[in-house]
Amino acid sequence: MTIKDELRGKNIIIPDNPVSNFLFNNTRSALLWLVIRLYLGYAWLTAGWHKVTSDQWVGSNAGAGLTGFVKGALGKAAEGKDVTGWYASFLENMVLPNATLFSYFVAFGELLVGLGLILGLLTGIAAFFGAFMNASFLFAGTLSTNPLLFILATWIVLAWKVAGWYGLDRWALPLLGTPWSNRKRNKGDQSTAT
């Protein structure tokens, strides 16, 4: 097929290699994703629970915990360590003045990501937001477990079709019409029968 054909709208489908097909499309890999999902979900759930039950994150002193974290990141940026200028600017001009609001976002976001991963409900979306928060923490100069959690979350995002198979996604996703819709299966069965 030529580039001209591609530009004219020819649909070219490149098949997955066997390993990718097994990991990201085959429900036999769901047990592996269950283990990873539960580990990641537990990490997020416990982190979120500590924040939700802390006065400095969502109580009467909400925002104090996040303010301390942001000031630490800004100190690293001032020293030229680990925090890039554009992210320090975002923290200083956007997050710090709205620390209470962002504190609630972080605390409840971590809790919801953990619940989504443990229950296997909207697993790909939960993993995406977990990876987003990990990236935010990494940009703020915090290593800890963030690199590992980020890598695992991105893998779960890639495996979204099967990562929640042993969870609520097995029933929730078909109701949303993806990826195991009964309509698609019935149409496929009819086309092969004729």
Image: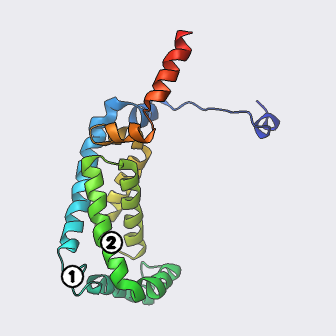
Q: Position of residue 60 (x, y in %)?
A: 21, 86
Say which quarter of the image contains residue 99.
bottom left
The residue shown at (40%, 76%) is 140
Say which quarter of the image contains residue 24.
top left
Q: Position of residue 155 (x, y in %)?
A: 39, 48
Near mark 2 (Cα within 10 A), the count class, few <14, some 14-19 or many ≥20, is some
Image quadrant containing the N terminus: top right
The residue shown at (47%, 22%) is 186
Dot label at residue 81: none
Q: Is residue 145 visible?
A: no
Q: Position of residue 74 (x, y in %)?
A: 40, 87
Near mark 1 (Cα within 10 A), the count class, few <14, some 14-19 or many ≥20, is some
Tell me the amino acid under the disc marked 1. Gly
Q: Which residue is mark 1?
A: 59
Question: 113 or 69: nearer the eye?
Answer: 113
Q: Left or right: 14 with respect to 109?
A: right
Tell me the amino acid under the disc marked 2. Val
Q: Which residue is mark 2?
A: 106
The residue shown at (28%, 39%) is 32
Q: Left or right: 71 with respect to 40?
A: right
Give the answer, above or below, for where 108 lies relative to 7. Answer: below
* Tally of marks: 2
Mark 1 element type: loop
Question: 11 or 39: nearer the eye?
Answer: 11
Say which quarter of the image contains residue 92.
bottom left
**Considering only order in the chain, which callout, 2 or 1, is on the residue closer to the N terminus?**
1
Structural distance between the alpha carbons of marks 1 and 2: 14 Å
Mark 2 element type: helix
Give the answer, above or below, for where 188 lies relative to 175. Answer: above
Give the answer, above or below, for where 112 lies relative to 28. Answer: below
Q: Left or right: 25 with respect to 62?
A: right
